[in-house]
Amino acid sequence: MSSENPIFETLGTHLFPSAADKQYHMGHMWIYWTDGDDDPPSRGYWPLFTAIPKELRDAEAIRNFLITDKIPGRFVDESVNLDLTEDMRNQSRERKWTINIGQKMWLERRCHIESGHDGENEGFYSCDEKREDCENCCSWAVKIIWCDPVRTGQVFM
């Protein structure tokens, strides 16, 4: 990362492997960044659940649908998962990077959620990793982490 801006805080990812995910058995990945607050901002990518056909009632049917189809996606505030991570520390995986103030500001703009909203609609979601027109929680998180402004530290204001 560039040293043009002073070092500021941390960008991190959390991953619950599918074996640790007792509810959906799919696992989940999200990002967070520290900003000196006790409650760091965190974002994860999910399907827009209201777009899942209502006749799909059980987790297996929904999982199969998300593997074969695509629906609108949404990034949301994942603060609740930070608490879960503390409770399941031995089952989750975490990776951290040091970021500078420009990178942090870019993350805040890129992952901004309007006040009063629980998330922002973005793109399409599918668990089929071969679909190039869709994201899932992992591909979305990796896309944010490895985009040029974060990866290179070259943030232009």
Image: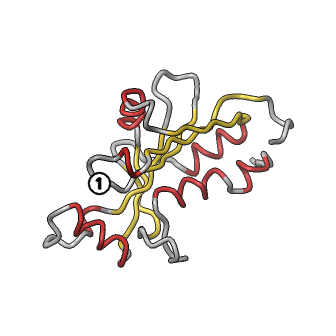
In the displayed structure image, the side of residue 129 where residue 120 appears, left or right? left
Residue at the spot x=40%, y=41% of the render?
78
Expressed as whole percent of the image width and height from the top left, the position of residue 94 reads 55, 37
Q: In this rendered view, identify the residue nearer to me: 127 or 47.
A: 127
User: For the residue marked with disc 1, what is the amino acid?
Assistant: Tyr
In the displayed structure image, the side of residue 1 where residue 65 appears, left or right? left
Expressed as whole percent of the image width and height from the top left, the position of residue 110 reads 57, 51
Which residue lies under the disc numbered 1?
Answer: 24
- The crowd level at tag 1 (other Cα within 10 Å; few <14, some 14-19, many 20+) is some
- Note whether 51 is above or below 146 in the view shown: below
Residue at the spot x=34%, y=47% of the render?
21
Expressed as whole percent of the image width and height from the top left, the position of residue 156 reads 77, 50
Residue at the spot x=27%, y=61% of the render?
49
Expressed as whole percent of the image width and height from the top left, the position of residue 134 reads 48, 72
Q: In this rendered view, identify the residue nearer to me: 112 or 84.
A: 84
Residue at the spot x=25%, y=67% of the render?
62
Residue 47 appears in which quarter of the rendering?
bottom left
Instruction: Check the picture and name the quadrant holding the N terminus.
Output: top right
Q: Secondary structure at mark 1?
A: loop
